[in-house]
Image (cartoon, grey):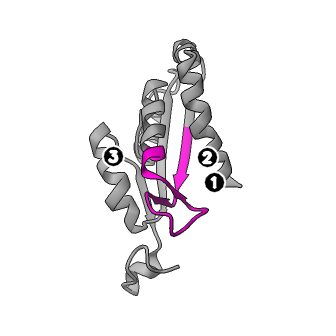
Amino acid sequence: MLRSIMLRLSKLLPALDKIKLLDLLVGLKVRDSILLIIMYHEVGKDIYQDESIPGQLFEDEIRYLIKLRFKILPLCEALEVIENAPDRSHRIAVLTFDDAYRGIYENALPIMLKYGIRGSIYPVAGFIKNRVPCGLHK
């Protein structure tokens, strides 16, 4: 079900962009802060069907977040920004990556470097301790 929602969003966002509705959203004045936390498992590989997102869809999401004027930060920095300026409105998106699969390094990282953004990775400590290669433990 999650995969079908992602694929629908991947069709919806370009359609909204084509009719200039995203431009209207960009212009909206926001009084309160918006903090989006977007969780990914794997990027670019299809071996974890319900947990992976194609690399192109990941890059499209990044571009739309930037177009919607979201500042993309690691979680610790996002919380600092909000804490240090609680009276200001913020549009912040946090990208989190659970399990530290290999595709995050191979596919997501080059896209993130291209746009100058960072995220937060949460590896499974047991796999590191037991030296299980990322992306091979399922």
Label 3 – label 2 distance at C-alpha: 18 Å
Toward the viewer: 10 or 98? 10
The residue labelled by disc 2 is 6
Q: Is residue 32 above or below residue 114?
A: above
Amino acid type at mark 1? Arg
Left or right: where 65 falls relative to 108: right
Q: Is residue 33 visible?
A: no
- Magenta-highlighted residues: 36-58
Q: Please state the horizontal and vertical placement of residue 86, each as a whole percent of the image.
A: 52, 27
The residue labelled by disc 3 is 111
Toward the viewer: 123 or 46? 46
Amino acid type at mark 2? Met
Q: Secondary structure at mark 3?
A: helix
What is the crowding at mark 2: few (fewer than 14 residues within 10 Å), some, or many (at least 20)?
few
Label 2 close to label 1 by CB (< 8 Å) = yes
Q: Please state the horizontal and vertical placement of residue 111, each as a whole percent of the image.
A: 33, 46
Amino acid type at mark 3? Ile
Q: Is residue 12 above or below residue 107?
A: above
Q: Is residue 78 visible?
A: yes
What is the crowding at mark 1: few (fewer than 14 residues within 10 Å), some, or many (at least 20)?
few
Q: Is residue 45 magenta?
A: yes
User: In what quadrant of the picture does the N terminus appear?
Assistant: bottom right
Toward the viewer: 131 or 104? 104
Q: Please state the horizontal and vertical placement of residue 110, each as a whole percent of the image.
A: 29, 50
Q: Residue furthest right?
A: 1
Q: Which mark is residue 3?
A: 1
Q: Earlier in the sequence, mark 1 or mark 3?
A: 1
Residue name at image x 53 percent, y 79 percent: 138
